[in-house]
Amino acid sequence: MSTVTEGKLTELKQYASNIRQEIVKMVAAANSGHPGGSLSAADILAVLYFHEMNAGPDKISDPDRDRFVLSKGHASPVLYASLAEKGYLPKEELATFRKINSRLQGHPSKKMLPGVEQSTGSLGQGLSAANGMALAARLDKRDYRVYALLGDGEIQEGMVWEAAMAAGHYKLDNLVAILDYNHLQIDGNVEDIMNVGPVADKFRAFNWHVIEIDGHNLEEIISALDEAKTVKGMPTFIVAHTVKGKGVSYMENACGWHGTAPNAEQLAQALEELCAQGGEK
Amino acid sequence: MEKTTVKKIATRDAYGQALVELGRENQDIVVLDADLAKSTKTADFGKEFPERFFDVGIAEANMIGMAAGLATCGKIPFASTFALFGSLRVADMIRNSVCYPNLNVKIAVTHQGLTLGEDGASHQAVEDIALMRAIPNMTVIVPADATETKKAIRAAANTYGPMYIRMGRPSVPVLFEDDYEFEIGKGVQIREGNDVAIIATGVMVHIAVEAAELLAQEGIQARVINMATIKPIDEDIIVKAAQETKGIVTAEECNIYGGLGAAVAEVLCEKHPAKLRRVGVEDTFGESGTPDELLKKYGLTAENIASKAKELL
């Protein structure tokens, strides 16, 4: 297991809870957005931004910073909440999400919001951009790492497999792709709509090192990322088994919460539940 | 400025040479191709700079996305394939991964339009100019000859922003001397005349010059303008031509819908209404044949340009 202290784990748990609270608040304020697939990725982003990555508001233009690409761009609330928690933007600004004149577009815009490494939203494109960033590191002899988060529905896009083939071919061992495997997409279960499994075998066949974890277990996320750093000559694919809507009882595993905003009453319940899971008030 | 020699060079060959020269000068230039490096002529760059050359296989979408990622890290990627695969096939990737974040990616395509030739309609992009022109932040350049191609590629490398540069397969006459000055966004008058004006782009420029010569035999003086940059288009040179002549003929190796002819029509309608005739592919698919046979069959000829010009007098 990971070498992090109990104190660090408590801290990360708190960040994850804070991120989740901001997600539901943001989506409720916008009365629009994608809470389900944002909540499922909150633990992963908490670890990336508050433990794993060399990144922060003071390093926005640092050529040696680690890069994160949210390929599943509709989960923008989890990215914005993480960036706000990290200090890239004031938390108050999260209330402008999806509103006119906001930097917080429905899907992340690199040009508008510093800290967003690539514009995403049209699914399937983020891994290719991450490939390019990882190749640039090699060309420039820099040792930064590149992380991409993909949705399980998203990997139905053919471009993902072009990118997966290329990352394996170029042996991009500075690249980690994480699959938010929550098993739900807009129209229903991923397995029913267009089964992407067995994903681990598929990525192994594309010459990736594959690790399967519980995507809500902070220690497992940390140790998988640690293991990825020891892998040479191939990119790492982390299959993170997650629960869509994780942390809010009525949203968990409920397809309807892919792209629906909670009302005031539902928001209050969500915040109460999330607060009890270790967040700040 | 015009050359009397009949020396012919394919613009794709000039592209390959320009890339190698730029690669020697600028370490940030990287080149991507999708299994057509021998045809697009990027293979020469790959030979000299293998570490900066990525043949991604037959996977154009990933090529555009990787180019975008490289550009976020300060590289100047040139991504090459045939015009069809570098535009229509990857339109969303160009729009969302390159143009929306305004990344410094150069999509340099070859085998444009009908003159791709024998491979036929499946490979002949006649819609790409319209499509690329419609994407915000994109610059669209179609060089007329080898000299202009080299200058345009250099200008593209030295000017920030997404660009679509469209080049051809067959050899075309070299029109310009080495001292030719190319500027992105500027049309160039290459022949004087105040009866009519012919505004042409790419492979049609030398054909437009031939048309002007045909017209001259009948005592009609046609101004010829080389419009290498289709977006942003040089409005001033169009308005001036409209003011000083009786009408304008456009000539392009592209669908007249959305291409150069449409761009010129937009400027004329808003700035200085004038008579206009468009020579181009008339909303149809091409077919197999030699480039010359195709140009003739689809009306992309000096005779057709001259005939359209006479309608304006």
Image (cartoon, coloured by chain):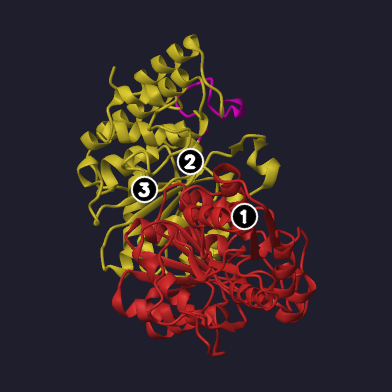
Quarter-of-image position of residue A39 = top left
**Same-chain status of marks 3 and 2:** yes
What's the mark number on residue B130?
A: 1
Answer with left or right where residue A197 lies relative to residue A49. right
Q: Could one spot residue A201 in this view of the protein?
A: no
**Magenta-highlighted residues:** A243-258
Q: Nearer the viewer, mark 1 or mark 2?
A: 1
User: In this rendering, is residue B118 above or below B250?
Assistant: below
Query: What is the chain letter for disc 2?
Result: A
The colour chain A appears in is yellow
Residue at 26% x, 52% y is: A65
Q: Nearer the viewer, residue A179 or A105?
A: A105
Q: Position of residue A35 (x, y in %)?
A: 49, 28
Quarter-of-image position of residue A88 = top left
Residue at 29% x, 77% y is: B25
Q: Amino acid at mark 1?
A: Ala
Among the chains, which one is red? B
Q: Amino acid at mark 3?
A: Glu
| Image quadrant occupied by the C terminus of chain A | top left
What's the mark number on residue A117?
A: 3
Q: Position of residue B285 (x, y in %)?
A: 77, 64
First of labels 3, 2 by sequence position: 2
Q: Position of residue A41 (x, y in %)?
A: 44, 37
Q: Could one spot residue B125 in this view of the protein?
A: yes
The residue labelled by disc 2 is A73
Does the magenta segment cover residue A273? no
